[in-house]
Image (spheres, rainbow, N blue to C red):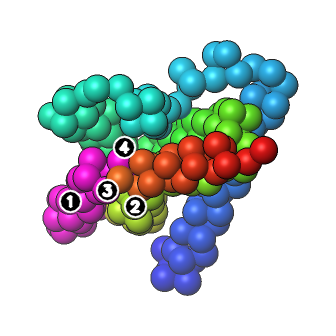
Amino acid sequence: MSIKWRKKHIYITLKIHMILFLGVFFVGVLLISLRWADESFWLGYQAENALKQLTAVDISPLGFLHFLLKNRLPIWIILCIFTGFDRGKAALLVFSGWTGLSLGVLSAAFARQFSFFGILLSGTILVPQIFAYLPAYIVLIKNRRNRSALLFLKYALLSGIYVIGVICEYFLNPWFLQKIYTVMHVFSHNTP
């Protein structure tokens, strides 16, 4: 396969993942808009993290870290394993779709509950860990079926970046969410 064709193939693959993510994201928003809100929060793996942080449920710091590791690392390991097989593209597409649906449902549910601040809050849920998760996932998509002697090293490096995302989600994301929630609380009490 020529380098030019490989770059074009990677571009098309990333575009398919983006279209799938956005399409299913809007399906999730539509589900909530059609008054399907009562069952909405079970759909997303991001939801439990957000709800625990926003409702100030008393969870121990180690319990929260255990929750993150239990819900993030197995998915990442499964994706890494599947990318080595010919049918790994389907697993990556399912993950893109599931993530889109999860975030769409969560964003719409927050927007229904908190209006404008819900949109801000749903974006804040992703900060700063998205800056580690997204590049690791994109490189994983780009290196699918790329069998080389350095493949293990690439996966170890990508996994390190992904773990940095988990650490950011553990240490920094609660701080961001608390700040946004405080601003929401101040504005909701100051409006007539």
| Residue type highlighted by circle 4 | Leu
| Residue type highlighted by circle 1 | Gly
Q: Residue at x 65, y 63 (%)?
A: 15
Q: Element at badge 1?
A: helix
In the picture shown, does residue 149 fall above or below 167?
below
Q: Which numbered mark, 2 or 1, is in the foreground of this view?
A: 2
Disc 4 to disc 3, C-alpha distance:
25 Å
| Residue type highlighted by circle 3 | Leu
Judging by the rendered image, the residue that carries numbered circle 2 is 128
Label 4: few (<14), some (14–19) or many (≥20) C-alpha neighbours in 10 Å = many
Judging by the rendered image, the residue that carries numbered circle 4 is 79
Q: Which numbered mark, 2 or 3, is in the foreground of this view?
A: 3
In the picture shown, does residue 116 fall above or below 151?
above
The percent position of residue 12, horizontal first and vertical second, equals 64, 66
Q: Element at badge 3?
A: loop
Q: Earlier in the sequence, mark 4 or mark 3?
A: 4
Judging by the rendered image, the residue that carries numbered circle 3 is 172
Would residue 129 appear left or right of 25 to someone viewing this image? Answer: left
Using the rendered view, name the quadrant where residue 55 is placed: top left
Residues in magenta? 147-174
Q: Earlier in the sequence, mark 2 or mark 3?
A: 2
Judging by the rendered image, the residue that carries numbered circle 1 is 160
Label 2: few (<14), some (14–19) or many (≥20) C-alpha neighbours in 10 Å = some
